[in-house]
Image (cartoon, rainbow, N blue to C red):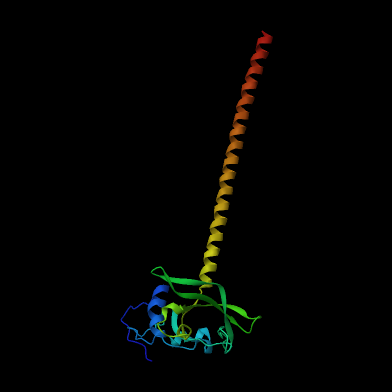
Amino acid sequence: MAPADLPPGFRFHPTDEELVNYYLKRKVHGLSIELDIIPEVDLYKCEPWELAEKSFLPSRDSEWYFFGPRDRKYPNGCRTNRATQAGYWKSTGKDRRINYQNRSIGMKKTLVYYKGRAPQGLRTNWVMHEYRIEESECENTMGIQDSYALCRVFKKNVALGEFQKQKQGECSSSQANEKQEQFTSVRDAGQSSGSNEHGKDNTWMQFIADDLWCNKTK
């Protein structure tokens, strides 16, 4: 299926509720979608860095959306096969429920891509959000909610995070140096003031001693 002609400046940033309640729901029911913006791709036969060229979105966008058929790991089981040729997608954290108008319409799973084979895989910065529709949202069709998932794929910008941490460290170091300089200034000022007071006391004591000596000699 060819991508739709997109107007200049087009951006696609749907919410979780819109992805499930409109795009995924219409896909599993075989209904038309107004704008053909999400292609159908077998995600687990591709590596994550190959997905950008399969997207219908402009290449400048940093995340991509796909409808993926659910491939079962076991014929009679419910586990999905998420292994690619070079690695595998591993789920992380708990699935999050997607709500719309005070009812649950779907679930959101977060997965991270690992190179190699489990359990010695090497974690990468590729992340996938997998959206599934609730069975209650599927009309008169058994098992249709498992026919497709809607996936959002993106790569985390680690360099930016490291830069922010570095800047925070520099700011903390600068603040610490500034506090040390302020403490040193206050300490030096106190010592200078103390020495001045001490000098005044010595002068005053010398004046008293001289006065007493003069009285004795008279």
- Expressed as whole percent of the image width and height from the top left, the position of residue 127 reads 52, 77
- Expressed as whole percent of the image width and height from the top left, the position of residue 178 reads 55, 50
Residue at the top extreme of this rendering: 218
The residue nearer to you, when weighing 57 against 74, is 74
- Expressed as whole percent of the image width and height from the top left, the position of residue 215 reads 66, 10
Location of residue 142 with respect to 11 vertically, above or below: below
The residue nearer to you, when weighing 84 against 67, is 67
Location of residue 108 with respect to 33 vertically, above or below: above
Q: Quadrant of the N terminus?
A: bottom left
The residue nearer to you, when weighing 77 against 176, is 77
Identify the residue shown where x is 57% and y is 88%: 76
**In which quarter of the view is residue 190 placed?**
top right
Q: Is residue 19 left or right of residue 200?
A: left
Q: Quadrant of the C terminus?
A: top right
Identify the residue shown where x is 49% and y is 75%: 108
Q: Is residue 169 visible?
A: yes
Identify the residue shown where x is 62% and y is 24%: 203
- Expressed as whole percent of the image width and height from the top left, the position of residue 189 reads 57, 38
**In which quarter of the view is residue 136 placed?**
bottom left
Q: Is residue 62 visible?
A: no
Location of residue 201 with respect to 160 vertically, above or below: above
Location of residue 203 with respect to 217 vertically, above or below: below
Residue at the bottom extreme of this rendering: 1
The residue nearer to you, when weighing 96 against 214, is 96
